[in-house]
Amino acid sequence: MRNTKARRDLSIFVLVMLTLVVSTAGAQTVRYVPKHDELKYTFGGHKPVLSVKPGTTLESWTEDCYDGRVKSPTDVPSKIILANHDNPQTGPFYVDGADPGDVLAVHILKLEPALSYGISSSFPNFGALNATDYTAMLHEALPEKVWWYDIDKTRGTVKFKALKGDFSTDIPMRPFLGCLGVAPARGETRWTVTPEAFGGNMDCPEVREGNTVYLPVNVTGALLYFGDGHLVQGDGEIIGTAVEAALNVRLKVDVIKGRTIAWPRIESDSELMTMGSYRPLEDAYRIAHRGMVDWLVADYGFDMMDAYQLLSQVGTAQIAQVVDPNYTVLARFPKKLLPAKAVFGGAHDKLKGGKNKVG
Amino acid sequence: MRNTKARRDLSIFVLVMLTLVVSTAGAQTVRYVPKHDELKYTFGGHKPVLSVKPGTTLESWTEDCYDGRVKSPTDVPSKIILANHDNPQTGPFYVDGADPGDVLAVHILKLEPALSYGISSSFPNFGALNATDYTAMLHEALPEKVWWYDIDKTRGTVKFKALKGDFSTDIPMRPFLGCLGVAPARGETRWTVTPEAFGGNMDCPEVREGNTVYLPVNVTGALLYFGDGHLVQGDGEIIGTAVEAALNVRLKVDVIKGRTIAWPRIESDSELMTMGSYRPLEDAYRIAHRGMVDWLVADYGFDMMDAYQLLSQVGTAQIAQVVDPNYTVLARFPKKLLPAKAVFGGAHDKLKGGKNKVG
Amino acid sequence: MRNTKARRDLSIFVLVMLTLVVSTAGAQTVRYVPKHDELKYTFGGHKPVLSVKPGTTLESWTEDCYDGRVKSPTDVPSKIILANHDNPQTGPFYVDGADPGDVLAVHILKLEPALSYGISSSFPNFGALNATDYTAMLHEALPEKVWWYDIDKTRGTVKFKALKGDFSTDIPMRPFLGCLGVAPARGETRWTVTPEAFGGNMDCPEVREGNTVYLPVNVTGALLYFGDGHLVQGDGEIIGTAVEAALNVRLKVDVIKGRTIAWPRIESDSELMTMGSYRPLEDAYRIAHRGMVDWLVADYGFDMMDAYQLLSQVGTAQIAQVVDPNYTVLARFPKKLLPAKAVFGGAHDKLKGGKNKVG
Amino acid sequence: MRNTKARRDLSIFVLVMLTLVVSTAGAQTVRYVPKHDELKYTFGGHKPVLSVKPGTTLESWTEDCYDGRVKSPTDVPSKIILANHDNPQTGPFYVDGADPGDVLAVHILKLEPALSYGISSSFPNFGALNATDYTAMLHEALPEKVWWYDIDKTRGTVKFKALKGDFSTDIPMRPFLGCLGVAPARGETRWTVTPEAFGGNMDCPEVREGNTVYLPVNVTGALLYFGDGHLVQGDGEIIGTAVEAALNVRLKVDVIKGRTIAWPRIESDSELMTMGSYRPLEDAYRIAHRGMVDWLVADYGFDMMDAYQLLSQVGTAQIAQVVDPNYTVLARFPKKLLPAKAVFGGAHDKLKGGKNKVG
């Protein structure tokens, strides 16, 4: 009787036109590059573009947050982007065997800039030091401006050039996906600018090559989306945009049965990370840190108060962004201070290893 | 190319089975009472149950927030309600001629308890003085309890009876709709516990008999939902529920062309009211009061700073609720201090007057 | 060893120069009108100007928030007021027998405008819809403007006159003290723009004639201050100032032994009220409502969950202000729904009654 | 006419009893170790213990946050510490030539644990994942527990030992001062648990050996306090305490004329850092980042929008703590991306260099 029921049946319509399947000793590599009119502007509410098995490597691409419409430094984003066409998403991908209550593991094998430049801009009524639609004030909007960043692939940098004066500086690239998410719970569909329990526009620099992101599964097949390529971003993304770019993307997905998580988690070789995306910022912080205490208790057998104490001394906290409809905080814990133990059935090591390991 | 397109075409499927149309000198009264499996659990994402013309009076009914499952004081809501079946909605109703950018006016002609009792309860991890999923802490949850309120229709009261001790007191009823909303913008569908720019679960006592609610139209036909009947509620709804009850509902709808609003507004005989629903609470406050300044400037010709000043001296502010995914604040301005002038084309007077005037 | 120790000894220096003591059948009336250089600019940190017995009526006066420097509509407050001379306070008054942990009761017998006008103004970087020093943004400040309100004593109104255009309207006066507080706990002294647990700049319209304010006593003698006369103010004081005015003030004080409160409370003939002053606004809300639950439990014998439930249905909440260094929320509960019972030893009735009753 | 005036005259009472002055080629080293009854429990409100010249090296010591009362793992802090004796401070020190509007530079030469252990504990109603006096709820308090950390000086670690189970792990020490501040502005004195514009209990890991902290000067002589030694702390100090310890402290102070700052700043060899301490957490974030934009504009000649953009891509943000009366966020900017340029007259290099350079 819920509207999610209809969606669960949609996997039978899976599109396979652009798909190249390479079977290699039981593991699969699937290639899917969306045409522009296949891009999505919500998390949830769509038929999957493709169905993939756990263990599949997905080779794909994602458009930049400007829907690919900003093509020169003189284009004005707020005028040139179609209404509600921010953060176009690639997907969704239906993952076989993913049921509500499971965990979807997404390992990021490779992220590379697809073009020769990145773009950043201010937007009227958006940003951490601007009045916004939500932090509503009576001031005139700050000006809308575009910064064009040329990529130096050899050095792995982008060049910041001041709009006033002739200062420039090279910034090392650290590409990541601003958006990675699944269909939300409760039959919701959410704007692609929003992060929440389903992931989404977390704008979190740790959604990067080499890391594994764990997402709650809310609907059959999980329905994975990604987009909003970032070449580099500071903590908080204060002006409202990172150095935005289309990216070539290589991911590997897996399903973890028998575990349930409330909010996204990330695992790197050296850290456990838990995420909270809400307002005010202290609630995002609380969600993330409550998640880490829960993780330490459930997987490492800590007493709750011991976990609270240890996290208080060795945890780090990263403010991913304070500009989106919810703010995102990441709690981080160093693995080296914990007993050697694989979490989520060793999904991180399994996904990064073997044939598909990043060169 | 947006998923909203499909929805806009759905009006051709309008259900008319339960509809009684009474044409009276050009005005219409339509009756629609949903069967249980016609109730909705999101704002947005559904085919309309009915198409109505501007000026139509709608006679209807809405279930209580417990999906009608709590039938005795010993039922435990969190165990007995199906997952995500909170706040079931009646609707949606397609309003002819309502286009994105228009304003939908909903005048509430009548709200009456449909049964002989109301119910309130605490929920684990929900409420203003509880740790919640968002204000996440390490405490054990407060207990879940149910208070049963018998209605005295003659006196117009409900009776509070303490669970411990024998104290009881009679509380005057002031029925209102906890939920009134339209399909959200940007192709979103939202859980029926959420209030935002589209209205929704505002839990605002001014959504009551005699008042007119103005809502932004985001999709063709607006798609009006309502539900979550409240017999009485304090400011803030601190325990997470009002005295909840199924209600008989009589509404009259109209469409205002050529005006656009960002957030809901309410008009009573004596007040202009503007709403904000977000977190933190000061942002809900800011949205509401920015909305009121905008209204005074646009409809009464005030200079912005004069409006800001006058509102600062004569405005009142009501905290509707601080328990839902967004918090709701209402800014209120007394009409008597303003020049006599009809706003929104005199919609409030027009809708409350004439043949359909509440007896 | 604490710096508060020194202060406790200061009562021996009590100034009596401007004091007129009228003994009437055991009750006292004391008159104290400060000279300008006796005004205070912090809560805490001063020798008392006067020592009074419980039961004493105090006739006094307080300057406006502009330190009396704005004398015409063309004066620019931010340029003409000496640094940190906002909200000058009358006092402090040492109340005999008030010890840390006691409650000071202050009944407001009379508040009358001392001059023929009130003043309101915007300030740069101050106000609910402005970027401020705390909600720091990159916008240019909103303009500083002064509105001059003439008082019509016969009608009991002040006249708002728009600065642009010729609109004017009469607003009924409801005078109150923006500031009422005692020396803070923990040896703190606080800027007179700040409200907190000690009271202070609560900007709460219920600190008005006929009501009794209960304040925690933190130091021997309590050290009572008041100031910041307001002729009328909307909820939130959004532009940062009410209609500000010097007031003639008549108060009566009492000490309640054997009771301790954490935050200010107010009692009127019809309501119990509890206050919270903090940020974010939801924490001010939580403090106030936690205080009300505590009050109902302690004085009326409610079970905590019953108190939480009943308050949820019948409580009202007033946002006093959202512009000061802490925001202030008032939780309100109607006495008529409670068993007839005097709280705080019947202090409210005792203080308002008898010879000193307001004529 | 302000109460600060009296304090400004107090320098004549400077205590010199415990002072050893070593003059070395024009530079001075002064040693001051407070007796217990010389410790201070507010920022502001005291006579200086010592007067020092700019360029002076101060050798000193500070007690732990427990006022030195917790001497074994079975001591219960909330019962054993005298009321309001948290975070005892060493000082204040009067710095010759420091006038209101100047900047005080404090370079930290050396911080070493004074004892063989550190202590951490939970407190009732305190901590990021607890209901508190401000985030007031109805839950029972979490338990109060003490963790005892033995120091391994050779390895530079402290040992965490779980209270339940036998898990232990070694944590590298990174000592810093939880408190560093000056007398507040506006005649305020503040509890030593509070951080604000004057510095104070910022609980910021960057107030560490090798870094220079810049503080606004609010009163003549600045009146420098420090205390609350921390051996190591995670971001946020979520349980409410770091690994707390008495520290031996070596500082060097300087006065920068002709510059004014609103909030503390920090300079390391590699970074510029700006601080904000307020609530909600997003306002602390905004203050810190507004401060960094201001710094880049003032000292490096950036256009405001260019500074906003560049900071958005390369800035990092650290949440120092989310447990104190105000929350603290640090904005960080890498110097290597900026033109080589000394800020504040090269104070950082000057203070760390020369004769007093850390061994």
Image (tube, coloured by chain):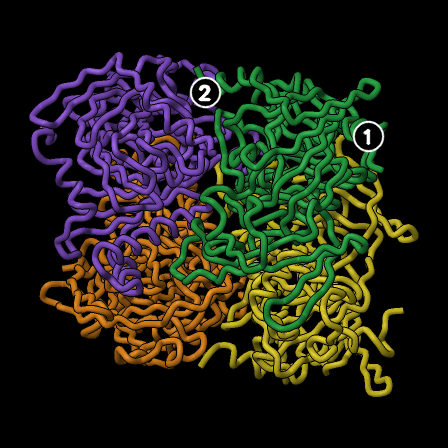
Chain colours: A orange, B yellow, C green, D purple
A39 relative position to C228: left or right: left
- Give the x, y percent position of residue B51: 69, 80
The single residue placed furthest to the right in the displayed view is B154
Q: Quadrant of the C terminus of chain D?
A: top left
- The residue depicted at 37 percent of the width and 58 percent of the height is A202
A95 relative position to D158: left or right: right
Residue marked by disc 1 = C356
The single residue placed furthest to the front in the displayed view is C17
- Give the x, y percent position of residue C21: 73, 23
* Residue type at numbered disc 2: Asn
Q: Is residue A6 shown above or below A321?
A: below
Q: Is residue D53 shown above or below A118?
A: above
Total marks placed: 2
Say if labels 1 and 2 share a chain.
yes
Q: Could you tell me which chain the residue with mark 2 belongs to? A: C
- The residue depicted at 25 percent of the width and 34 percent of the height is D97
* Residue type at numbered disc 1: Asn
Please tell me whether mark 1 sits on a helix, a strand or a loop: helix
Please tell me whether mark 2 sits on a helix, a strand or a loop: helix
Q: Could you tell me which chain the residue with mark 1 belongs to? A: C
Q: Is residue A1 shown above or below C196?
A: below
**Residue situated in front as seen by the camera: C352 or D205:** C352
Q: CA distance from mark 1 to mark 2?
A: 38 Å
**Residue situated in front as seen by the camera: C125 or D117:** C125
Q: Is residue A273 shown above or below B345?
A: above
Q: Which label belongs to residue C3?
A: 2
- The residue depicted at 9 percent of the width and 66 percent of the height is A154
- Give the x, y percent position of residue D75: 41, 14
In the picture, residue D313 is in which quadrant?
bottom left
D335 relative position to C99: left or right: left
